[in-house]
Image (cartoon, helix red, strand yellow):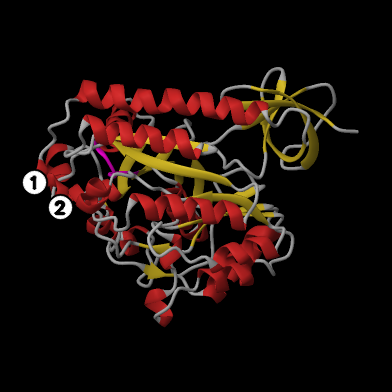
Amino acid sequence: MTINIITLGCSKNIVDSEIIAARLQKLGHRVFFEGTMKTDLVIVNTCSFIGDAREESVNEILAQIERKMRRQVKKIYVVGCLAQRNKQELVAELPEVDGFFTFDELKKLTESADFDLLGTSERLLSTPVHYAYLKISEGCDHQCSYCAIPLIRGKQVSKPIPLLVEEAQKLADQGVKELMLIAQDLTYYGIDLTGKRELANLMEALAQVKRLEWIRLHYAYPLNFPYEILDVMNAYPQYCRYLDIPFQHVSDDILKSMRRGGTAQYIYDLIARIRETVPGIALRTTLISGYPTETNEQHKELVEFVRKNRFERLGVFAYSQEEDTPAYELGDPVRRNIKTRRVNEIMQLQEGISRELNEAKVGQTLKVIIDGEEQDFYVGRTEFDSPDVDNSVLIRKDKALKIGEFYNVKITEGADYDLYGEIEN
């Protein structure tokens, strides 16, 4: 069959789709990603993290049903978090879909009795060949009050280090130069395997993989932060001076209600120590605005937190009430327009911070990897930027550059979320 896999949601879903694709290709099928051609089967890998993600997933399924009615696709299968969480109601409401598969039922889809998303190193890449994501564990042991991920994905299950090293080397052999480590929580990696945190040991092992030039860390949990990973980051030049560490909020009372643990003082001290240990590191964080108990004063505290810490990269979600989570019983009292105003206030502040930080880079020469090209510019990234979520470096097409190659670029201009530069001779 010809099979088109459409992936929605986070980078962890991207990896899942690539593993499914590799298995289907091994069975003799022709597999594409995000293709619009006529196919025998389309698989929609869905997200169910927040309300907007569920809406996007349902809309994509409806769009594929419309394509099926126009005979552009013969069958539709739905997998991923939405199928896991809401299979029964989806079956009733969307009879045009030919199959909904929970994670346990992927064995049937892949015709493999021992199929396991964490049990293989075989992948068919959907990203550009020069970068890839490496999912080091599945699920989460934390019980954050707002989050449905443990309900959907279950307890943390870590992928053994030898299998991850094997997977990383296979990716590097295919031409991958940049690897992004992802999980619901990187910092608890290995506890289920050995009873202790193994992220530093994994980082040491991955640093031995040949032909990887950049490795970056996504989704670190703040509480009980394993500072030894910073020493590994300093020891190996492959590790980008970059850390994605979602803080969600800074109010002591809200952190307690969120079941995040820690205090505002702990978070401020953690940020200071990270920046002191790894000079020049770019910190990416995520915040939640409009949590049910958030007052105007607590919102101002969050704004001041952003102002003082001047994060290099930052995103904000408006709170989404999720059924069966501990925070669900708190209701959703913060009106949508107030959430929107609070989100916008934080992001306007961050826009100014980002512009100032970018302007400070003017005159510097930075190592840049080229991701693609537009009409007038090549589009690249520094070690301080992850694909799709962070800043870009725009380089005018004065000379031909190769996609996936590294260049030294002198920064000539800093904008809100982009840098402009020229190749240094």
Dots 2 and 1: beta carbons under 8 Å?
yes
Residue 115, visible in the rendered structure: no
In the rendered view, would you say 48 is above or below 211?
A: above
Q: Does residue 421 appear left or right of residue 158 in this picture?
A: right
What x and y, as percent, mark residue 93?
A: 14, 37
Q: Is residue 400 left or right of residue 87?
A: right
Amino acid beneath label 1? Glu
Which of the 4 image quarters holds residue 319?
Answer: top left
Circle 1: element type: helix
Indicate the position of residue 169 as horizontal and vertical percent values.
65, 65
Tell me the SS state at disc 2: helix
415 magenta-colored: no
Query: What's under tag 2, amino acid-wise?
Result: Pro
Residue 329 is labelled as 1
Dot 1 alpha-carbon crowd within 10 angstroms: few under 14, some 14 to 19, many 20 or more: few
Decide if residue 113 is in sight here. yes
Range of residues picked out in magenta: 46-51
Occupied quadrant, residue 141: bottom left
Q: Is residue 19 above or below residue 204?
A: above
Residue 401 rendering spot, x and y as whole percentages = 80, 33
Residue 339: x and y, percent? Answer: 25, 27
Residue located at (58% from left, 33% from top): 391
* Residue corresponding to mark 2: 326
